[in-house]
Amino acid sequence: MSKITLMCRVATTFLKDGGIDEPAQRKFLQRFVDANLGVYLGSGGQGEGHTLSKDELRAVYTIGVDVCKGKVPVFANPPEQYTAKSNIEHMQLAVDCGVEAVNLYAIAGWHSMRPTELELQVYYDTILTAIKSPIALAAQPLVGYTIKPSMIAQLCNKYPQVVTVNLTGVSEAYFLQVKDLIKRPIRFDVPITSSMHTLMLGATGLLGTEANIIPKTYRSYIDLYEKGNLIEANKVYAQIRRYIDYTAPWNPGPIRWIKMAMKVLNLPGGEGGIREPYQMPATEELNRFRDGLLKLNIPEINELALAAGLKLPPSG
């Protein structure tokens, strides 16, 4: 069994009328079970969590737990909030649905909000005193600012329910500072970019948005790495890197290219599209996106394309 955990913030599938497409969501999640990747449900970005009502979040969590629990890690990633009270409500909803852990962001940085050290400490203490279930602590500057390594470490040392630290968007030096300050075993999840280096420095998990489309490629990368076959692992990493670079023009907001790829590759939920304020591009742009995607010559994408009835471009 892999010692390195793979996690993906998964997309939410919709019907054409905007409702949640439960059959498609089940099929979409099964792809992660088959590839042995854990899932984060209802993320604000990739899962369009900011567009979901609490009843819809409950449905997303319930479906995810039913499909994934006991097979792969199933975590919730409630959208970031302004207050401890609101965060507790959202986190408790996920806990009540049976997820194994809940992600905790810092105070949302809307309207240039930058909390003081005291405000952050009170915020975290209030939440972590109320929620005793396993928690993944997000250090990344998604909310508009970065939490000091010393505060992340202090929270991990004080609250045993913190089981994971998510380190997307921070430097290698930041990771090492946090790692050196934490006094107990804990999981460190890092992004795929430069991951071979950070894994060698002590990271124990990967977070990968691209795994929404290429989960088996991520699994292949880690399996090869753990076997010590670094030459082949680097070849697979290069495939993922090319995918990241190709989709970059549709960032920030990865749900754009995730839903575009789901549509052109005929993945479960692809026809349902995306929720406002996001908009799917016109057919001409989708076709250009599809053609460029196929030119990447990534085996898993080729497999999906053939299953969708698409013609692959000539190799070479």
Image: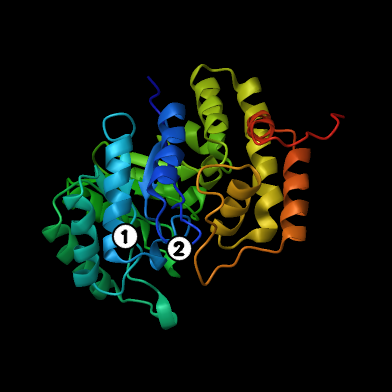
Amino acid marked by disc 2: Gly
Dot placed on the residue nearer the N-terminal end, 1 or 2: 2
- Please state which of the two labelled residues, at mark 1 or mark 2, is closer to the viewer: 2
Residue matched to label 2: 18
Q: Secondary structure at mark 1?
A: helix
Report the quarter where the N terminus lies: top left
Q: Relative to residue 142, is residue 174 depicted above or below?
A: above
Apparent side of residue 264 relative to residue 44 in the rendered image (left or right): right
Q: Relative to residue 20, is residue 81 depicted above or below?
A: below
Give the percent coordinates (x, y) of residue 279.
59, 67
Q: 267 or 258, which is in the foreground? A: 267
Q: CA distance from mark 1 to mark 2?
A: 11 Å
Give the percent coordinates (x, y) of residue 90.
24, 62
Apparent side of residue 313 relative to residue 168 in the rendered image (left or right): right
Q: Quadrant of residue 125?
A: bottom left
Residue matched to label 1: 56
Q: Relative to residue 157, is residue 55 depicted above or below?
A: below
Q: Is residue 147 visible?
A: yes
